[in-house]
Amino acid sequence: MKQVVQNYKSGELALLDVPAPGCKPGGVLVRSAFSLISTGTEMMKVSEAGMSMLGKARSRPDQVAKVVQSVATNGVPATYRKVMGKLDSYTPLGYSLCGVVEQVGAGIDDVKVGDVVACAGNEHALHAELNWVPKNLYVPVPDGVAPRHAAFGTVGSIALQGVRQGESRLGEVALVIGLGLIGQLVTQLLNASGVRVVGVDPDPARCELAERLGAAACGDPGSASVESAVAELTGGMGVDQVYLAAGGSSNQPVELAARLCRDRGRVIDIGKCRLDLPWNAYYEKELDVRFSRSYGPGRYDPEYELQGRDYPVGYVRWTERRNLGCFLDLIARGSVDVEPLVSHVADFEDAVETYRRLEEGELKAVAVLFRYAAEDAPAVEAPEVTVPKVPELPRPSGRTAPARRSGPVRLAFVGAGNYASSMLLPHLTGRDGVELSTVVTTTALSAANAQRKFGFGKATTDLDAALGDPAVDAVFVVTRHSSHAELTRRALLAGKAVFVEKPLALTEEELASVLAAVEESGNDRIQVGFNRRFAPLLREARELFGDRTGPASLRYLVNAGRLDHGSWYLRQDTEGSRFAGEGGHFVDTASWLLDADPVSVYAAAPAGNEDLQIVLGYPDGSTATISYVTSGPSSFPKETLDLIADGKVLRLDDFTRASVYDGRRRQWAGSRLPKARDKGQNAELAAFVRAVRTGGPMPVPLESLAATTTATLAVRTALASGVPVTLAGAR
């Protein structure tokens, strides 16, 4: 299928061929009929992509701060790969459309195939021929509403949410600053609510349009006519509310709002304009400044948008889905008329040219629609991406794989997110004896991006096709944590060698299911991404330390830091605790240095924060204390480690310097100078590929992988019980 995309690094716009999305549970697959260009938000994004790198940095200081933090945590090379990988990727455009349901996912019973729906979301209502849309981001289109009008649903919901934030009342007077698409819709909604509107915009054509659609008066922001109209309509008191629907860098809108608003009036920001509030003006009138967040309650909440968990109507009357339905109902009843806003309708094949004309000012428009192929066009075959029962697939008969005698090792990646793209795939691209065969993702564009950047032979959303491909030798599972165990289990049963990023499992039951798949299939060809034991600096330091004769004491400080609000790592109900997700790294490193698996786990957490203190016991009496803290300063190194035994100390400083003290002298691993941070991903991948090619043992024994996972999961039990947990089956 085709989709409109943009490369944020180069600014290139393209109509790209991408794999069709699958129809996942909890949503529907929709074939687009019309999609709406947001001439404000989208064109701002298009313009920003055309800036120089310095211009991009200036426009997004929040992202610059994240880059600086990443350099401190991960080093310059890893951060550079991460940033450039994000920039040099195609990103989608669009967030408002109308289409026809082609396929219904499990758990959906409010629509059926053939129904016309309006869809929302900058990840789900894209300028693309097919979109998968979760339940809370679509609504059926009422009878009598044309699909081209229903395509306004999302933008209409943004305007409607702004009006709700203004708490307009019958008979009030409002000022709408900015008469673009949002401003025109706000004007109509206020007029339908019995509120008289004065509009402000420097474009006379937009002022005339707003007056035709119900505004009492409109004019240029610098003209005296606007102030005269406000004075006449309000008896000199000033407007009750002001809606900022303008964009740009001028501070004129907020200054005008203060001048024309009444005492204790309301100012609602809907657009993205400069907000340097003149303190005296806002203070003296005690103005109430409010923000309107997109389509309404539920926006940016993954449980609402992705998992379909609605808010009780008694507590949240107007969610984003209810706003969407309400706006379509207003169109159906004739209270809002969007047809006069349609400046241009373009065929979808002409999308790139349409954006060019808009950006260069050749096409003056309030609203532009893309028109897709007729509904009776041949359907695109779209695979259904679910988590079904394990298919009947060929299984190996023994626990070792035959050596590959010729040809490259063919790899399939399930998932191609930030970690895979910055820390794994760069080490595999162009490696002798490796062929990147297939990339599988849940979204079409991410698969297409990975194929373009890393040279995969195929890009798809069909997992079963990759697992059933006899040419694929090994599968990389690099998805979110909650899917690791199930995908690993399926790949093992399909007879593939598996590289799964940590964690292997989030629960004891998940770990048991993976081990049961090994037992059932006889396939134990598995490696978990515990890369730190492969770090060259740490391996060299271990050699310098040498063998030990007595018990050791190991101290490992992990300055994990705080996560950004909204990070999926924080979704403990679905993705497990943060330590369950990444703690295996540190348990594995300790066990490798001590050459044993833990036999006991004790854990404690200070009241009021997320810091963990974990003590691992080992068979010879050695102990490893892992301090996993989130409250430390970001300027301090992320990982520091000390191993003390037999009168010697091994010291590791964040994988940049390592040394060994033996009581008489200090020996440096490598050199005294800090090195580029290498946490062992490249060496780990080389060892895994070599094992797949030769049929030799996996880099880490399965028993050790299982023991590390068991110990990591036992931390939760130890925290709850307050006593050490004894582990069974340790070697």
Image (cartoon, helix red, strand yellow):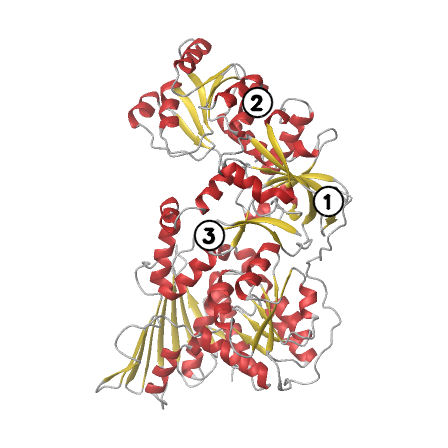
Dot 2 corresponds to which residue?
188
Q: Nearer the viewer, residue 57 or 174?
A: 57
In this picture, is 414 found above or below 336? below
Residue 552's x, y, as percent?
Answer: 36, 83
Horizontal side of residue 244 vs 576, given as left or right:
left
Residue 466's x, y, as percent?
Answer: 67, 68
In this picture, is 624 found above or below 112? below
Where residue 83 sits, quadrant-wise, is bottom left
Q: Residues within 10 Å of mark 1 (few under 14, many from 20)?
A: many
Q: CA distance from mark 3 to mark 1?
A: 35 Å
Dot 3 corresponds to which residue?
10
Residue 221's x, y, as percent?
Answer: 41, 21
Q: CA distance from mark 1 to mark 2?
A: 30 Å
Q: Nearer the viewer, mark 2 or mark 3?
A: 3
At a point 48% along the width and 68% down the height, the residue shown is: 426
Marks 1 and 2, the one that precedes in the sequence: 1
Q: CA distance from mark 2 to mark 3?
A: 39 Å
Residue 167's x, y, as percent?
Answer: 50, 24
Marks 2 and 3, the one that precedes in the sequence: 3
Dot 1 corresponds to which residue?
101
Type of amino acid at the residue the image marks with label 3: Ser
